Image: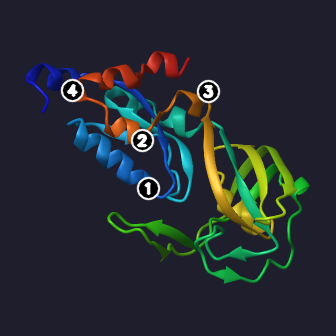
Amino acid sequence: MANLTQLRMLEELDGLLLVDKPAGIAFSSVVKTVKRKFNLVKVGHGGSLDAMASGLFVVLLGGANKFVGDIMGADRSYTGTMKFGETTDTGDRYGRPIPLPERVMKPEEAKGDLFQTEPRFCAVRREGSAQYDIADTGEHTQFLAHVYRFEVGEKDASSGESAFSLVASKGVIVRALAQDLGATLMSLRRTKIGKLSIDDAIPFDKLLETDIGNLPSCVVPISRALR
């Protein structure tokens, strides 16, 4: 249990907490857990991450929430795997199979400015459940995203999956890109947001083991994160 000195210290804590979110956990659960475990008041985040995805998730503490636009507006880098030739209503492995689009985009076409529409259906994992539910999020409007780099490797003979790497602007929806490519997103890992890297992130399970008095040592100062 935190003492009075630690509570005062946490009240004044500003900065970014770089978390390596494991697959299977909703990003909202990460925010709630950090807030509850460390008795924090003002906790936000720098951009959502699907439950099925792992990787860099930025938690904003205190005054760092003023800079949410800078974090959310930064470019993103991902790695992952796709299975080409089949797709689902969610775009990922947890959805229901659907026919391929009439026109399937080629990987070499998935660069530059792209108009995307978020899939109507989304796989969500509710707290306390080991299963994914399919949620109907309604129709979404089309928006413009930009892909700087998209590279696809050879298909793995045993799994039928192809590894990929992606660098894109904010808001890009990899599940939607998979659908356009006539593929299913099998795994996804976010590795960078702007200059922030997964290499500097603390694994979520290790964060849960961190003593409340040691939290400040895990926080990246705003001045260093945004320079």
Sooner in the amino-acid sequence: mark 3 or mark 2: 3
Count of numbered tags: 4
Instruction: Provide the secondary structure element on which disc 3 rests.
Output: loop
- The N terminus sits in image quarter: top left
N-term mark: 2 or 4: 4
Residue type beneath disc 2? Phe
**Above or below 70: residue 78:** below
- In this view, 96 is above or below 199: below
Q: Which mark is residue 204?
A: 2
The answer to whether mark 2 and mark 1 are in CB contact below 8 A is yes
> Residue at horizontal 80%, vertical 50%?
113
Question: Is residue 197 visible from the viewing direction of this image?
Answer: no
- Pointer 1 residue: 25
| Sequence-first disc among 1 and 3 | 1
Residue 201 image point, x, y percent: 50, 32
- Secondary structure at badge 4 equals helix
Disc 3 versus disc 2: nearer the observer: 2
Which numbered disc, 4 or 3, marks the residue that appears first in the sequence? Answer: 4
Task: Kindly identify which residue carries mark 3.
Answer: 195
Q: CA distance from mark 2 to mark 4?
A: 22 Å
For label 2, the crowd category at 10 Å Cα-Cα, with few meaning under 14, some 14 to 19 and many 20 or more, is many
